[in-house]
Amino acid sequence: MKLKAIIHTAEEGGYWAEVPALQGCITEGDTWEEVLANLEDAIQGWLEVANESNQTTEPGEEVEIAV
């Protein structure tokens, strides 16, 4: 699975990142390497919670499925 993330420079130093496709999936890190590692952890955690609750999308949200 490939997801796009946006990494921002934090005003107080370091970086913060968000994954627009995964509502609320954000993280931060002091270095580029740290924010990338934290981003992987945040995505995995988000997907695990979504899988457990079986709600990866909100009602009425459009999804694209290849068959």
Image (cartoon, rainbow, N blue to C red):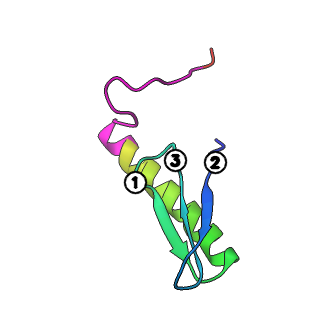
Res 24 label: 1
What amino acid is labelled 2 in the image? Lys
Q: Report the Cα–Cα distance between label 1 and label 3.
A: 8 Å
Disc 1 and disc 3 in contact, CB within 8 angstroms: no
Q: Decide: few, some or many residues near mark 3? Use Cα within 10 Å; few <14, some 14-19, many ≥20.
A: few
Res 4 label: 2
Is residue 33 shown left or right of residue 26? right
Of the image marks 1 and 2, the number of the one nearer the N terminus: 2
Q: Report the Cα–Cα distance between label 2 and label 3.
A: 7 Å
| Magenta span main SS | loop
- Please state the horizontal and vertical placement of residue 22, each as a whole percent of the image: 47, 46
Disc 2 and disc 3 in contact, CB within 8 angstroms: yes
Q: Report the Cα–Cα distance between label 1 and label 2.
A: 14 Å
Name the residue located 46 percent from the left edge and 23 percent from the top edge. Answer: 62
**Element under disc 1:** loop
Task: Please tell me whether residue 12 is drawn above or below residue 9 in the rendered image.
Answer: below
Asked if the magenta segment contains residue 32, the reply would be: no
List the residue tagged with mark 3: 20
What amino acid is labelled 3 in the image? Pro
Name the residue located 55 percent from the left edge and 76 percent from the top edge. Answer: 10
Of the image marks 2 and 3, the number of the one nearer the N terminus: 2
Give the camera-side residue of 49 and 29.
29
**Element under disc 3:** loop
Looking at the image, the residue that sits furthest to the front is: 11
Q: How many marks overall?
A: 3
Name the residue located 52 percent from the left edge and 55 percent from the top edge. Answer: 43
Give the camera-side residue of 14 and 2.
14
The residue segment tinted magenta is 51-65
Name the residue located 34 percent from the left edge and 32 percent from the top edge. Answer: 58
Give the camera-side residue of 18 and 11.
11
- Please state the horizontal and vertical placement of residue 26, each as a whole percent of the image: 47, 61
Task: Please tell me whether residue 67 is drawn above or below residue 58 in the rendered image.
Answer: above
